[in-house]
Image (tube, rainbow, N blue to C red):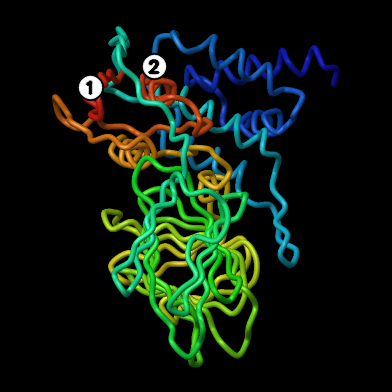
Amino acid sequence: MEQYSMETRLEALFRQWCDNTIDEKDIPELMQLMQDTGMHQELEKLTRAVYFQQEATPFFTPEQKRKMFLEIVRPADFSGSKIKYITSIAAGIALVIGVSCYLFFSKKHTANTGKILANDIAAPTAAIGLLQLENGNSFHFEDTRSGTVTNQENIKIVKYDDGTIAFNGKTNKPMSGTLTVPKGSKPIRLLLPDSTLVLLNAASGITFPSAFTGNERKVVFYGEAWFEVKHDPAHPFIVKLDKGQVKVLGTHFNIRSYNNDAQTKVTLIEGKVTVNDNVVLKPGQQAVVENNTPNLLKHPDMDEALAWKNNEFNFNGWEVPAILNMLSLWYNFTVEYKSSIPAGHFSGSIKRDNNLSQVLKILETGGLQFEIQKDKLIVY
């Protein structure tokens, strides 16, 4: 099939998809065309072109279409610790079109008259951390220069040139410390005494000893973080959470466990972990813990789970409160709803170094209006 005819066919099927006239037997062909990286620019143009078409009664429900798109971007296969994905471009396309589908099928969609955001909130530019020691001493890391921060009472704290904070102490007199990263901070890298690396997202905290003793390496954690655990079969690494625990020997994984989240999510990239002592994860799998009960997802959205680590926001079929809660941790604002909480699900992907107003444009396409007043976001 020639390039020109492929583009023509894509346009025809895509428009049928969006105005709900597509024949079910043509859907696999549309899915195949969407996976063609050469169609990426054409899909972007088509998405913009159909934004203002009149919506019709859906042939498929928004949830059915969302699930079809998720099938496009789920991991294709697993080989050891390496996860092969169907192209990231296809994932991006799915997210862009997810916004389109919301526009067409949300019954509460209205034209966005656009409230001008006279104020704005910039993305964080500094990594801000507070380390509080068991002996009462504390250290702020926003403006701390690289080098040895302190070396006393069997405790040595060093800040490296790349911003990593290393915490060590003698085993005969271990002392605990708690590192907290506030809302509105860039992530902070922490090197634990066993050389385990932890990357803490905003609004997160971890409590750990200056030296690991005994048969286990145990830390207490809340928020979101990426762990690269030093392999040590004789001393399992245990992360205690509000909603359970994660036990590992040596592995790379992500934990999202904020106190106000209904769910805790543990996503494994490399190695093997046990969640709440009864769910074992393999690379590319995720455990979702709700009401202290973990459930195994064999094909999670890996791009979404690791987006923050790659300096992105990535939400696929999220409700408005969940999106704004996630944004509030990064931009450090509170939310006020002037009317009822907006319904509907949104999808989108954007870099985290954009100003808040740029990120909100994804939600504005669904008819929402916003106003920023200092550190408050008002939703109309």
Of residue 192 and residue 12, the one placed in the foreground of this image is: 192
What residue is drawn where x is 28% and y is 11%? 115
Q: Amino acid at mark 2?
A: Ala
Please give the name of the residue rendered at 55% of the width and 74% of the height, measured from the top-left corner.
Answer: 193
Residue 246, percent from left and from top: 46, 74
Q: In the image, 373: left or right of 282?
A: left
Give x and y (percent) for residue 376: 23, 29
Total numbered labels: 2
Q: Nearer the viewer, mark 2 or mark 1?
A: 1
Q: Earlier in the sequence, mark 2 or mark 1?
A: 2
Instruction: Say whether residue 239 is visible.
Output: yes
Task: Please give the residue where the numbered disc 2 appears in the rendered image.
Answer: 56
Of 51 and 215, the residue lying toward us: 215
Label 2 – label 1 distance at C-alpha: 37 Å
Residue 368 rendering spot, x and y as whole percentages: 29, 20
* Front residue (pair 142, 316): 142
Name the kind of residue labelled 1 in the image. Gln
Residue 40 vertical placement versus 289 (above, below): above
Q: Are marks 2 and 1 in contact (CB under 8 Å)?
A: no
Q: Which residue is mark 1?
A: 373
**Within-10-Å neighbours for mark 2: few <14, some 14–19, many 20+:** few
Q: Secondary structure at mark 2?
A: loop
Q: Where residue 280 appears, x then y in whole percent?
A: 53, 76
Residue drawn at (63%, 20%) of the image: 43
Dot 1 surroundings within 10 Å: few (below 14), some, or many (20 or more)? Answer: some
Task: Report the quarter where the N terminus lies.
Answer: top right
Q: Is residue 58 visible?
A: no
Q: Work out whether 191 lies above or below 7.
A: below
Asked if residue 375 lies left or right of residue 4, the reply is left
Left or right of 258, for residue 196: right
